[in-house]
Amino acid sequence: LKMAQLFIALSEDRQEDVYLIYHKTMGVRTRNNVPDIHYKMAAFWFDRDTPDITGTMNVHHFTEWLHTQDPVVHLPDEYVMAGRVSVLLRAVGAAFGIRLSTAQPWRKYAEQLLRDHSLWPTPVLTPQLEV
């Protein structure tokens, strides 16, 4: 349910909600918990690697840059594989010259999951929202 909330916020580019979900609800912690770094990290792992997120850096340089800016101190295991799948799907698309967003196509499934749990349409998210 938490990932569903994240996909919807990412698909709408609601940066503050992405930060709140990623940090407060999902429990991702970095040394300084910088909101912009959390947003870029969530967008990179679960949605896209467009210039607004990675600048001109490739995947390797961007992940190193994230670590130098605000290193991760806690990343719940249940989110690791979903992030890797998102990155790998986008890499396959890039090999064919296609730039993908994973949050956009996964949004309809996220909405349905939240609807099935009577959580859709979702209110504006707050740090207190825990599912």
Image: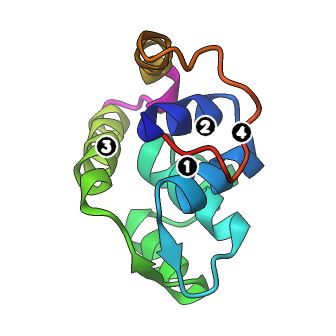
Residue 119 shows up from this direction: yes
Q: Residue tagged by mark 4? A: 125
Asked if marks 1 and 4 touch (Cβ < 8 Å), the reply is no
* Count of labels in the image: 4
The Cα atoms of the two marked residues, 2 and 1, are separated by: 7 Å
Q: Position of residue 59 (x, y in %)?
A: 41, 63
Instruction: Indicate the secondary structure of the residue bearing disc 2.
Output: helix
Residue occupying the point 45% across, 75% down: 61
Asked if marks 2 and 1 touch (Cβ < 8 Å), the reply is yes
Residue occupying the point 50% across, 74% down: 29
Q: Earlier in the sequence, mark 3 or mark 4?
A: 3
Q: Position of residue 45 (x, y in %)?
A: 43, 52
Residue type, numbered disc 4: Leu
Q: Residue tagged by mark 1? A: 43
Give the numbered dot on residue 10. 2
Q: Position of residue 103 (x, y in %)?
A: 49, 30
Residue type, numbered disc 2: Leu
Give the numbered dot on residue 93. none
The Cα atoms of the two marked residues, 1 and 3, are separated by: 15 Å
Q: Earlier in the sequence, mark 3 or mark 2?
A: 2
The Cα atoms of the two marked residues, 3 and 2, are separated by: 19 Å
Specify the segment rendered in magenta.
96-104
The Cα atoms of the two marked residues, 3 and 4, are separated by: 31 Å
Instruction: Indicate the secondary structure of the residue bearing disc 3.
Output: helix
Q: Earlier in the sequence, mark 2 or mark 1?
A: 2
Circle nearer the viewer, 1 or 3 = 1
Q: Residue tagged by mark 3? A: 91
